[in-house]
Amino acid sequence: MTEMAVEAKAGSKSEQAYSAIKTHIVEGTYTPGYRLVLAKIAEDLGFSVVPVREAIRRLEAEGLVKFERNVGATVSGIDPTEYLYTMQTLSIVEGAATALSAPLIGPADIARARAVNAEMRDCLEHFDPVRFTRLNLDFHSVLFERCPNPHILDLVHRGWNRLASLRSSTFRFVPGRAHESVEEHEALLKLIENGADADEIEKAARRHRSATLDAYLSQTNAASLSAH
Amino acid sequence: MTEMAVEAKAGSKSEQAYSAIKTHIVEGTYTPGYRLVLAKIAEDLGFSVVPVREAIRRLEAEGLVKFERNVGATVSGIDPTEYLYTMQTLSIVEGAATALSAPLIGPADIARARAVNAEMRDCLEHFDPVRFTRLNLDFHSVLFERCPNPHILDLVHRGWNRLASLRSSTFRFVPGRAHESVEEHEALLKLIENGADADEIEKAARRHRSATLDAYLSQTNAASLSAH
DNA sequence: GTCATAGTTTTCGTATACGATTTCATACTT
DNA sequence: AAGTATGAAATCGTATACGAAAACTATGAC
Protein backbone atom coordinates (compact mmCIF):
# COMPACT_ATOMS: atom_id res chain seq x y z
CA MET A 1 0.00 0.00 0.00
CA THR A 2 0.82 3.66 -0.09
CA GLU A 3 2.52 2.93 -3.39
CA MET A 4 -0.21 4.64 -5.32
CA ALA A 5 2.19 7.13 -6.83
CA VAL A 6 4.27 4.48 -8.54
CA GLU A 7 2.68 3.47 -11.80
CA ALA A 8 4.36 2.34 -14.97
CA LYS A 9 7.74 1.34 -13.58
CA ALA A 10 9.37 0.46 -16.88
CA GLY A 11 8.18 1.15 -20.40
CA SER A 12 9.07 3.95 -22.73
CA LYS A 13 11.46 6.60 -21.51
CA SER A 14 8.72 9.16 -21.41
CA GLU A 15 6.84 6.89 -19.03
CA GLN A 16 9.88 6.34 -16.91
CA ALA A 17 10.48 10.07 -16.76
CA TYR A 18 6.84 10.56 -15.85
CA SER A 19 6.93 8.23 -12.86
CA ALA A 20 10.34 9.42 -11.76
CA ILE A 21 9.32 13.06 -11.64
CA LYS A 22 5.91 12.28 -10.22
CA THR A 23 7.48 10.28 -7.41
CA HIS A 24 9.79 13.16 -6.60
CA ILE A 25 6.86 15.53 -6.40
CA VAL A 26 4.59 13.24 -4.40
CA GLU A 27 7.38 12.19 -2.03
CA GLY A 28 8.39 15.76 -1.52
CA THR A 29 11.88 15.80 -3.06
CA TYR A 30 10.65 18.43 -5.45
CA THR A 31 8.75 20.91 -3.31
CA PRO A 32 6.22 23.44 -4.62
CA GLY A 33 7.89 26.17 -6.61
CA TYR A 34 10.77 23.93 -7.63
CA ARG A 35 11.82 24.70 -11.14
CA LEU A 36 11.81 21.75 -13.54
CA VAL A 37 14.42 22.47 -16.20
CA LEU A 38 14.14 20.09 -19.12
CA ALA A 39 17.85 19.83 -19.85
CA LYS A 40 18.72 19.28 -16.22
CA ILE A 41 16.19 16.52 -15.63
CA ALA A 42 17.10 14.92 -18.93
CA GLU A 43 20.73 14.78 -17.87
CA ASP A 44 19.88 13.42 -14.42
CA LEU A 45 17.85 10.60 -15.93
CA GLY A 46 20.23 10.02 -18.81
CA PHE A 47 17.52 10.69 -21.38
CA SER A 48 17.16 13.39 -23.96
CA VAL A 49 14.77 16.27 -23.53
CA VAL A 50 11.92 15.09 -25.74
CA PRO A 51 10.57 12.34 -23.49
CA VAL A 52 11.13 14.50 -20.44
CA ARG A 53 9.11 17.24 -21.99
CA GLU A 54 6.31 14.81 -22.70
CA ALA A 55 6.36 13.60 -19.12
CA ILE A 56 6.17 17.13 -17.78
CA ARG A 57 3.24 18.05 -19.95
CA ARG A 58 1.45 14.98 -18.71
CA LEU A 59 2.09 16.02 -15.14
CA GLU A 60 0.78 19.44 -16.05
CA ALA A 61 -2.50 17.88 -17.19
CA GLU A 62 -2.78 16.26 -13.78
CA GLY A 63 -2.17 19.56 -12.07
CA LEU A 64 1.06 18.52 -10.39
CA VAL A 65 3.15 21.08 -12.25
CA LYS A 66 2.44 24.49 -13.68
CA PHE A 67 3.70 25.15 -17.16
CA GLU A 68 4.34 28.45 -18.90
CA ARG A 69 5.07 28.82 -22.54
CA ASN A 70 8.73 29.53 -23.29
CA VAL A 71 9.41 29.77 -19.60
CA GLY A 72 9.21 26.30 -18.18
CA ALA A 73 7.59 24.19 -15.53
CA THR A 74 7.47 24.53 -11.77
CA VAL A 75 5.97 22.24 -9.17
CA SER A 76 2.47 23.49 -8.37
CA GLY A 77 2.19 25.60 -5.27
CA ILE A 78 -0.22 25.62 -2.36
CA ASP A 79 -2.45 28.46 -3.34
CA PRO A 80 -5.33 28.13 -0.83
CA THR A 81 -7.84 28.56 -3.62
CA GLU A 82 -6.36 25.66 -5.53
CA TYR A 83 -6.43 23.64 -2.36
CA LEU A 84 -10.11 24.37 -1.97
CA TYR A 85 -10.83 23.40 -5.57
CA THR A 86 -8.90 20.18 -5.23
CA MET A 87 -10.53 19.19 -1.97
CA GLN A 88 -13.99 20.01 -3.23
CA THR A 89 -13.48 17.98 -6.36
CA LEU A 90 -12.05 15.13 -4.36
CA SER A 91 -14.96 15.22 -1.94
CA ILE A 92 -17.28 14.70 -4.87
CA VAL A 93 -15.44 11.97 -6.76
CA GLU A 94 -14.28 10.18 -3.64
CA GLY A 95 -17.77 10.28 -2.23
CA ALA A 96 -19.09 8.71 -5.39
CA ALA A 97 -16.29 6.14 -5.53
CA THR A 98 -16.90 5.15 -1.92
CA ALA A 99 -20.62 4.80 -2.47
CA LEU A 100 -20.07 2.69 -5.58
CA SER A 101 -17.56 0.39 -3.96
CA ALA A 102 -19.48 -0.01 -0.69
CA PRO A 103 -21.56 -2.98 -1.87
CA LEU A 104 -18.35 -4.76 -2.85
CA ILE A 105 -16.57 -4.27 0.46
CA GLY A 106 -16.37 -7.49 2.45
CA PRO A 107 -15.77 -8.24 6.13
CA ALA A 108 -12.04 -8.72 5.47
CA ASP A 109 -11.83 -5.21 4.05
CA ILE A 110 -13.68 -3.79 7.00
CA ALA A 111 -11.35 -5.57 9.41
CA ARG A 112 -8.31 -4.21 7.63
CA ALA A 113 -9.72 -0.69 7.67
CA ARG A 114 -10.40 -0.99 11.39
CA ALA A 115 -6.83 -2.09 12.00
CA VAL A 116 -5.53 0.88 10.06
CA ASN A 117 -7.79 3.21 11.96
CA ALA A 118 -6.55 1.80 15.25
CA GLU A 119 -3.00 2.55 14.17
CA MET A 120 -4.10 6.06 13.36
CA ARG A 121 -5.34 6.48 16.90
CA ASP A 122 -1.90 5.40 18.03
CA CYS A 123 -0.30 8.03 15.88
CA LEU A 124 -2.37 10.67 17.61
CA GLU A 125 -1.11 9.65 21.04
CA HIS A 126 2.51 9.44 19.97
CA PHE A 127 2.16 12.45 17.69
CA ASP A 128 3.33 11.02 14.39
CA PRO A 129 1.64 13.16 11.74
CA VAL A 130 3.67 11.75 8.85
CA ARG A 131 2.58 8.21 9.56
CA PHE A 132 -0.94 9.40 10.30
CA THR A 133 -1.19 10.91 6.84
CA ARG A 134 0.11 7.77 5.18
CA LEU A 135 -2.33 5.59 7.09
CA ASN A 136 -5.14 7.94 6.18
CA LEU A 137 -4.61 7.11 2.54
CA ASP A 138 -4.49 3.41 3.36
CA PHE A 139 -7.78 3.68 5.19
CA HIS A 140 -9.59 5.48 2.43
CA SER A 141 -8.09 3.23 -0.19
CA VAL A 142 -9.98 0.34 1.36
CA LEU A 143 -13.17 2.31 0.98
CA PHE A 144 -12.82 3.43 -2.62
CA GLU A 145 -10.49 0.96 -4.35
CA ARG A 146 -13.27 -1.47 -5.22
CA CYS A 147 -15.08 1.18 -7.21
CA PRO A 148 -16.02 -0.59 -10.45
CA ASN A 149 -15.76 2.54 -12.58
CA PRO A 150 -12.10 3.07 -13.49
CA HIS A 151 -12.65 6.65 -14.64
CA ILE A 152 -13.92 7.70 -11.26
CA LEU A 153 -11.20 5.77 -9.50
CA ASP A 154 -8.61 7.54 -11.61
CA LEU A 155 -10.00 10.93 -10.61
CA VAL A 156 -9.77 9.92 -6.97
CA HIS A 157 -6.14 8.91 -7.39
CA ARG A 158 -5.34 12.19 -9.07
CA GLY A 159 -6.90 14.13 -6.25
CA TRP A 160 -4.89 12.26 -3.64
CA ASN A 161 -1.72 12.77 -5.62
CA ARG A 162 -2.28 16.47 -5.76
CA LEU A 163 -2.84 16.56 -2.05
CA ALA A 164 0.26 14.49 -1.48
CA SER A 165 2.29 16.98 -3.46
CA LEU A 166 1.17 19.68 -1.04
CA ARG A 167 1.70 17.48 1.99
CA SER A 168 5.33 18.28 2.65
CA SER A 169 4.61 21.95 3.09
CA THR A 170 3.15 24.16 5.77
CA PHE A 171 -0.35 23.32 6.94
CA ARG A 172 -2.17 20.01 7.15
CA PHE A 173 -2.73 18.11 10.36
CA VAL A 174 -4.93 20.40 12.33
CA PRO A 175 -4.70 18.55 15.68
CA GLY A 176 -8.30 18.78 16.79
CA ARG A 177 -9.50 17.72 13.37
CA ALA A 178 -7.40 14.54 13.40
CA HIS A 179 -9.27 13.25 16.43
CA GLU A 180 -12.62 13.91 14.82
CA SER A 181 -11.36 12.20 11.71
CA VAL A 182 -10.77 8.80 13.27
CA GLU A 183 -14.23 8.93 14.80
CA GLU A 184 -15.77 9.66 11.44
CA HIS A 185 -13.81 6.77 9.97
CA GLU A 186 -15.44 4.41 12.41
CA ALA A 187 -18.86 5.84 11.60
CA LEU A 188 -18.22 5.32 7.90
CA LEU A 189 -17.29 1.70 8.48
CA LYS A 190 -20.46 1.12 10.45
CA LEU A 191 -22.56 2.53 7.64
CA ILE A 192 -20.92 0.25 5.10
CA GLU A 193 -21.09 -2.74 7.39
CA ASN A 194 -24.79 -2.26 7.93
CA GLY A 195 -25.44 -1.93 4.24
CA ALA A 196 -26.64 1.66 4.41
CA ASP A 197 -27.89 2.94 1.09
CA ALA A 198 -25.50 4.45 -1.40
CA ASP A 199 -26.76 7.97 -0.95
CA GLU A 200 -26.16 7.97 2.77
CA ILE A 201 -22.64 6.61 2.38
CA GLU A 202 -21.84 9.13 -0.28
CA LYS A 203 -22.96 12.02 1.86
CA ALA A 204 -21.01 10.80 4.87
CA ALA A 205 -17.85 10.40 2.80
CA ARG A 206 -18.26 13.87 1.38
CA ARG A 207 -18.86 15.47 4.72
CA HIS A 208 -15.80 13.74 6.10
CA ARG A 209 -13.64 15.47 3.53
CA SER A 210 -15.45 18.79 3.64
CA ALA A 211 -14.87 18.89 7.37
CA THR A 212 -11.13 18.46 6.88
CA LEU A 213 -11.13 21.29 4.40
CA ASP A 214 -13.14 23.51 6.71
CA ALA A 215 -10.74 22.83 9.55
CA TYR A 216 -7.95 24.11 7.36
CA LEU A 217 -9.91 27.07 6.08
CA SER A 218 -10.87 28.16 9.58
CA GLN A 219 -7.18 28.75 10.17
CA THR A 220 -6.83 30.89 7.09
CA ASN A 221 -10.20 32.68 7.22
CA ALA A 222 -10.95 31.81 3.60
CA ALA A 223 -14.41 30.97 2.30
CA SER A 224 -16.04 27.80 3.54
CA LEU A 225 -16.90 24.84 1.39
CA SER A 226 -19.76 23.28 3.31
CA ALA A 227 -21.56 26.59 3.06
CA HIS A 228 -22.43 25.56 -0.46
CA MET B 1 -22.21 28.52 -28.19
CA THR B 2 -21.52 24.94 -29.09
CA GLU B 3 -17.93 26.05 -29.51
CA MET B 4 -16.84 24.19 -26.42
CA ALA B 5 -14.50 21.97 -28.37
CA VAL B 6 -12.44 24.84 -29.70
CA GLU B 7 -9.95 25.93 -27.11
CA ALA B 8 -6.49 27.37 -27.65
CA LYS B 9 -6.89 28.54 -31.23
CA ALA B 10 -3.35 29.80 -31.73
CA GLY B 11 -0.31 29.23 -29.58
CA SER B 12 2.42 26.65 -29.88
CA LYS B 13 2.19 24.15 -32.67
CA SER B 14 1.50 21.35 -30.24
CA GLU B 15 -1.54 23.30 -29.06
CA GLN B 16 -2.66 23.99 -32.58
CA ALA B 17 -2.32 20.32 -33.40
CA TYR B 18 -4.24 19.46 -30.27
CA SER B 19 -7.25 21.60 -31.13
CA ALA B 20 -7.16 20.63 -34.77
CA ILE B 21 -7.27 16.91 -34.06
CA LYS B 22 -9.72 17.32 -31.23
CA THR B 23 -12.07 19.26 -33.45
CA HIS B 24 -11.88 16.55 -36.06
CA ILE B 25 -12.77 13.94 -33.49
CA VAL B 26 -15.55 15.90 -31.84
CA GLU B 27 -17.03 17.04 -35.13
CA GLY B 28 -16.91 13.53 -36.47
CA THR B 29 -14.39 13.88 -39.30
CA TYR B 30 -12.27 11.31 -37.57
CA THR B 31 -14.66 8.55 -36.57
CA PRO B 32 -13.98 5.91 -33.93
CA GLY B 33 -11.36 3.46 -35.10
CA TYR B 34 -9.71 6.01 -37.37
CA ARG B 35 -5.99 5.53 -37.34
CA LEU B 36 -3.96 8.62 -36.40
CA VAL B 37 -0.57 8.30 -38.08
CA LEU B 38 1.91 10.84 -36.78
CA ALA B 39 3.69 11.46 -40.05
CA LYS B 40 0.47 11.85 -41.97
CA ILE B 41 -1.10 14.33 -39.59
CA ALA B 42 2.16 16.21 -39.33
CA GLU B 43 2.26 16.60 -43.09
CA ASP B 44 -1.39 17.65 -43.27
CA LEU B 45 -0.82 20.36 -40.70
CA GLY B 46 2.58 21.34 -42.04
CA PHE B 47 4.26 20.62 -38.72
CA SER B 48 6.84 18.06 -37.75
CA VAL B 49 5.95 14.96 -35.78
CA VAL B 50 7.08 16.03 -32.33
CA PRO B 51 4.29 18.52 -31.57
CA VAL B 52 1.75 16.20 -33.17
CA ARG B 53 2.85 13.41 -30.93
CA GLU B 54 2.48 15.63 -27.91
CA ALA B 55 -1.01 16.60 -29.00
CA ILE B 56 -2.03 12.99 -29.44
CA ARG B 57 -0.78 11.96 -26.04
CA ARG B 58 -2.76 14.77 -24.55
CA LEU B 59 -5.87 13.56 -26.31
CA GLU B 60 -5.12 10.12 -24.99
CA ALA B 61 -5.15 11.46 -21.45
CA GLU B 62 -8.61 12.83 -22.11
CA GLY B 63 -9.78 9.50 -23.42
CA LEU B 64 -10.48 10.70 -26.95
CA VAL B 65 -7.86 8.45 -28.52
CA LYS B 66 -6.44 5.09 -27.62
CA PHE B 67 -2.70 4.76 -27.80
CA GLU B 68 -0.59 1.65 -28.11
CA ARG B 69 3.13 1.58 -27.69
CA ASN B 70 5.00 1.25 -30.98
CA VAL B 71 1.72 0.81 -32.77
CA GLY B 72 0.02 4.17 -32.81
CA ALA B 73 -3.15 5.95 -31.93
CA THR B 74 -6.73 5.36 -32.99
CA VAL B 75 -9.85 7.36 -32.20
CA SER B 76 -11.54 5.77 -29.21
CA GLY B 77 -14.39 3.45 -30.01
CA ILE B 78 -17.87 3.03 -28.62
CA ASP B 79 -17.37 0.08 -26.34
CA PRO B 80 -20.67 0.04 -24.36
CA THR B 81 -18.77 -0.43 -21.13
CA GLU B 82 -16.74 2.69 -21.78
CA TYR B 83 -19.93 4.51 -22.58
CA LEU B 84 -21.36 3.47 -19.26
CA TYR B 85 -18.24 4.57 -17.39
CA THR B 86 -18.24 7.93 -19.14
CA MET B 87 -21.92 8.59 -18.55
CA GLN B 88 -21.72 7.56 -14.93
CA THR B 89 -18.75 9.81 -14.32
CA LEU B 90 -20.44 12.64 -16.12
CA SER B 91 -23.62 12.19 -14.13
CA ILE B 92 -21.59 12.70 -10.98
CA VAL B 93 -19.46 15.66 -11.99
CA GLU B 94 -22.19 17.36 -13.96
CA GLY B 95 -24.61 16.91 -11.09
CA ALA B 96 -22.13 18.56 -8.77
CA ALA B 97 -21.34 21.33 -11.24
CA THR B 98 -25.03 22.07 -11.73
CA ALA B 99 -25.69 22.17 -8.01
CA LEU B 100 -22.72 24.48 -7.46
CA SER B 101 -23.70 26.88 -10.21
CA ALA B 102 -27.40 26.92 -9.39
CA PRO B 103 -27.17 29.81 -6.88
CA LEU B 104 -25.37 31.87 -9.53
CA ILE B 105 -27.92 31.34 -12.25
CA GLY B 106 -30.01 34.43 -12.89
CA PRO B 107 -33.37 35.02 -14.59
CA ALA B 108 -31.64 35.82 -17.89
CA ASP B 109 -29.95 32.42 -17.84
CA ILE B 110 -33.21 30.70 -17.09
CA ALA B 111 -34.91 32.51 -19.95
CA ARG B 112 -32.18 31.49 -22.33
CA ALA B 113 -32.37 27.88 -21.22
CA ARG B 114 -36.14 27.91 -21.73
CA ALA B 115 -35.70 29.26 -25.24
CA VAL B 116 -33.24 26.52 -26.03
CA ASN B 117 -35.55 23.91 -24.61
CA ALA B 118 -38.40 25.22 -26.74
CA GLU B 119 -36.21 24.81 -29.80
CA MET B 120 -35.50 21.28 -28.70
CA ARG B 121 -39.22 20.57 -28.65
CA ASP B 122 -39.32 21.85 -32.20
CA CYS B 123 -36.58 19.46 -33.20
CA LEU B 124 -38.66 16.59 -31.92
CA GLU B 125 -41.59 17.51 -34.14
CA HIS B 126 -39.48 18.06 -37.22
CA PHE B 127 -37.21 15.16 -36.34
CA ASP B 128 -33.82 16.85 -36.35
CA PRO B 129 -31.65 14.75 -34.03
CA VAL B 130 -28.40 16.47 -34.96
CA ARG B 131 -29.67 19.87 -33.95
CA PHE B 132 -31.37 18.38 -30.92
CA THR B 133 -28.06 17.03 -29.69
CA ARG B 134 -26.33 20.35 -30.22
CA LEU B 135 -29.05 22.23 -28.38
CA ASN B 136 -28.89 19.74 -25.57
CA LEU B 137 -25.33 20.82 -24.89
CA ASP B 138 -26.37 24.45 -25.05
CA PHE B 139 -29.09 23.83 -22.52
CA HIS B 140 -26.90 22.05 -20.04
CA SER B 141 -24.13 24.56 -20.52
CA VAL B 142 -26.39 27.20 -19.04
CA LEU B 143 -26.86 25.01 -16.01
CA PHE B 144 -23.25 24.13 -15.28
CA GLU B 145 -21.10 26.87 -16.82
CA ARG B 146 -21.31 29.11 -13.76
CA CYS B 147 -19.77 26.45 -11.57
CA PRO B 148 -17.13 28.33 -9.58
CA ASN B 149 -14.78 25.36 -9.33
CA PRO B 150 -12.75 25.16 -12.56
CA HIS B 151 -11.55 21.63 -11.86
CA ILE B 152 -15.07 20.29 -11.77
CA LEU B 153 -16.05 22.32 -14.79
CA ASP B 154 -13.12 20.88 -16.69
CA LEU B 155 -14.21 17.35 -15.88
CA VAL B 156 -17.68 18.14 -17.18
CA HIS B 157 -16.25 19.46 -20.43
CA ARG B 158 -14.15 16.37 -20.85
CA GLY B 159 -17.15 14.15 -20.37
CA TRP B 160 -19.16 16.02 -22.97
CA ASN B 161 -16.28 15.89 -25.40
CA ARG B 162 -16.02 12.16 -25.03
CA LEU B 163 -19.71 11.82 -25.67
CA ALA B 164 -19.47 14.10 -28.68
CA SER B 165 -16.78 11.87 -30.14
CA LEU B 166 -19.20 8.97 -29.96
CA ARG B 167 -22.09 11.02 -31.26
CA SER B 168 -21.58 10.46 -34.95
CA SER B 169 -21.85 6.72 -34.59
CA THR B 170 -24.65 4.21 -34.18
CA PHE B 171 -26.91 4.74 -31.23
CA ARG B 172 -27.96 7.91 -29.41
CA PHE B 173 -31.31 9.59 -29.74
CA VAL B 174 -33.67 7.00 -28.40
CA PRO B 175 -36.91 8.66 -29.56
CA GLY B 176 -39.07 8.11 -26.50
CA ARG B 177 -36.27 9.26 -24.25
CA ALA B 178 -35.91 12.57 -26.04
CA HIS B 179 -39.46 13.56 -25.15
CA GLU B 180 -38.91 12.73 -21.52
CA SER B 181 -35.71 14.69 -21.64
CA VAL B 182 -37.26 18.03 -22.50
CA GLU B 183 -39.78 17.56 -19.70
CA GLU B 184 -37.00 16.91 -17.23
CA HIS B 185 -35.24 20.02 -18.46
CA GLU B 186 -38.22 22.11 -17.55
CA ALA B 187 -38.42 20.46 -14.14
CA LEU B 188 -34.75 21.24 -13.55
CA LEU B 189 -35.30 24.88 -14.43
CA LYS B 190 -38.18 25.11 -12.00
CA LEU B 191 -36.04 23.69 -9.23
CA ILE B 192 -33.31 26.24 -9.85
CA GLU B 193 -35.76 29.08 -10.24
CA ASN B 194 -37.40 28.28 -6.92
CA GLY B 195 -34.05 28.10 -5.17
CA ALA B 196 -34.29 24.43 -4.29
CA ASP B 197 -31.45 23.26 -2.13
CA ALA B 198 -28.23 22.08 -3.70
CA ASP B 199 -28.77 18.45 -2.84
CA GLU B 200 -32.12 18.30 -4.57
CA ILE B 201 -30.78 19.95 -7.70
CA GLU B 202 -27.79 17.64 -7.78
CA LYS B 203 -29.96 14.56 -7.54
CA ALA B 204 -32.28 15.74 -10.26
CA ALA B 205 -29.39 16.51 -12.60
CA ARG B 206 -27.91 13.10 -11.96
CA ARG B 207 -31.14 11.27 -12.52
CA HIS B 208 -31.64 13.15 -15.75
CA ARG B 209 -28.39 11.76 -17.10
CA SER B 210 -28.79 8.30 -15.61
CA ALA B 211 -32.14 8.03 -17.33
CA THR B 212 -30.56 8.78 -20.71
CA LEU B 213 -27.99 6.10 -20.08
CA ASP B 214 -30.62 3.60 -19.01
CA ALA B 215 -32.62 4.30 -22.14
CA TYR B 216 -29.59 3.36 -24.17
CA LEU B 217 -28.77 0.34 -22.07
CA SER B 218 -32.30 -1.00 -22.32
CA GLN B 219 -31.65 -1.32 -26.04
CA THR B 220 -28.46 -3.26 -25.51
CA ASN B 221 -29.48 -5.29 -22.45
CA ALA B 222 -26.34 -4.30 -20.57
CA ALA B 223 -26.21 -3.62 -16.83
CA SER B 224 -28.12 -0.64 -15.49
CA LEU B 225 -26.59 2.37 -13.82
CA SER B 226 -29.43 3.63 -11.67
CA ALA B 227 -29.53 0.23 -10.01
CA HIS B 228 -26.55 1.39 -7.99
C1' DG C 1 -4.46 -25.23 -49.58
C1' DT C 2 -2.58 -23.89 -45.18
C1' DC C 3 0.82 -22.69 -42.17
C1' DA C 4 5.29 -21.04 -40.86
C1' DT C 5 9.16 -18.08 -41.79
C1' DA C 6 12.12 -14.53 -43.68
C1' DG C 7 12.35 -10.14 -45.58
C1' DT C 8 10.30 -5.69 -46.48
C1' DT C 9 7.66 -1.71 -45.20
C1' DT C 10 5.50 1.10 -42.09
C1' DT C 11 5.43 3.59 -38.00
C1' DC C 12 6.82 4.76 -33.67
C1' DG C 13 10.55 6.44 -30.05
C1' DT C 14 14.18 9.35 -29.02
C1' DA C 15 18.68 11.74 -29.85
C1' DT C 16 20.65 15.72 -31.63
C1' DA C 17 20.66 20.33 -33.49
C1' DC C 18 19.28 24.90 -34.06
C1' DG C 19 16.21 28.89 -34.06
C1' DA C 20 13.03 31.59 -31.01
C1' DT C 21 11.80 33.50 -26.73
C1' DT C 22 12.54 34.88 -22.26
C1' DT C 23 15.31 36.25 -18.46
C1' DC C 24 19.09 38.26 -16.31
C1' DA C 25 23.05 41.28 -15.91
C1' DT C 26 25.29 45.33 -17.37
C1' DA C 27 25.88 49.82 -18.97
C1' DC C 28 23.90 54.01 -20.16
C1' DT C 29 20.72 57.99 -19.74
C1' DT C 30 18.17 61.44 -17.19
C1' DA D 1 19.92 57.05 -7.82
C1' DA D 2 16.30 55.21 -10.56
C1' DG D 3 14.87 53.64 -14.61
C1' DT D 4 15.56 52.18 -19.31
C1' DA D 5 18.00 50.11 -23.14
C1' DT D 6 21.20 46.75 -24.78
C1' DG D 7 23.55 42.48 -25.01
C1' DA D 8 24.54 37.75 -23.19
C1' DA D 9 22.96 33.53 -21.16
C1' DA D 10 19.54 30.29 -20.24
C1' DT D 11 15.73 27.75 -21.70
C1' DC D 12 12.15 26.38 -24.43
C1' DG D 13 9.97 24.77 -29.16
C1' DT D 14 10.37 22.14 -33.10
C1' DA D 15 12.73 20.18 -37.26
C1' DT D 16 15.37 16.52 -38.82
C1' DA D 17 17.51 12.03 -38.56
C1' DC D 18 18.08 7.46 -37.32
C1' DG D 19 17.40 3.22 -34.66
C1' DA D 20 13.79 -0.08 -32.93
C1' DA D 21 9.58 -2.34 -32.90
C1' DA D 22 5.59 -3.91 -35.06
C1' DA D 23 2.78 -5.00 -39.15
C1' DC D 24 2.57 -6.62 -43.51
C1' DT D 25 3.91 -9.49 -47.62
C1' DA D 26 5.78 -12.93 -50.18
C1' DT D 27 7.95 -17.15 -50.44
C1' DG D 28 8.50 -21.97 -49.55
C1' DA D 29 7.54 -26.36 -46.89
C1' DC D 30 4.25 -29.74 -45.81
Image: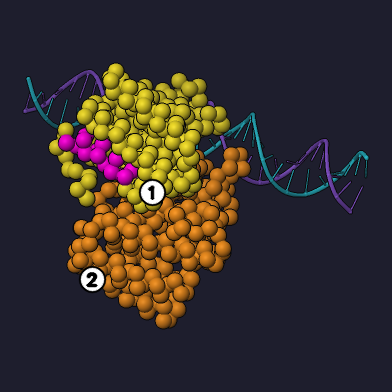
Chain colours: A orange, B yellow, C cyan, D purple
Q: Is residue A150 visible?
A: yes
Amino acid found under the numbered disc labelled 2: Ala
Q: Position of residue B158 (x, y in %)?
A: 39, 39
Looking at the image, is D10 positioned above or below residue A213?
Answer: above
Label 1 resides on the chain identified as: B
The C terminus of chain A sits in image quarter: bottom left
How many C-alpha atoms fall within 10 Å of the one at disc 2: few (<14), some, or many (≥20)? few
Q: Which mark is residue A111?
A: 2
Q: Nearer the viewer, residue B72 or A218?
A: A218
Quadrant in the rendering for residue B204? top left
The residue range painted magenta reads: B204-218
Left or right, residue A24 beside residue B188: right
Could you say whether the residue bearing mark 1 is in a helix, strand or loop?
Answer: loop
Quadrant the N terminus of chain A occupies = bottom left
Q: Main secondary structure of the magenta part?
A: helix
Residue B196, numbered label: 1
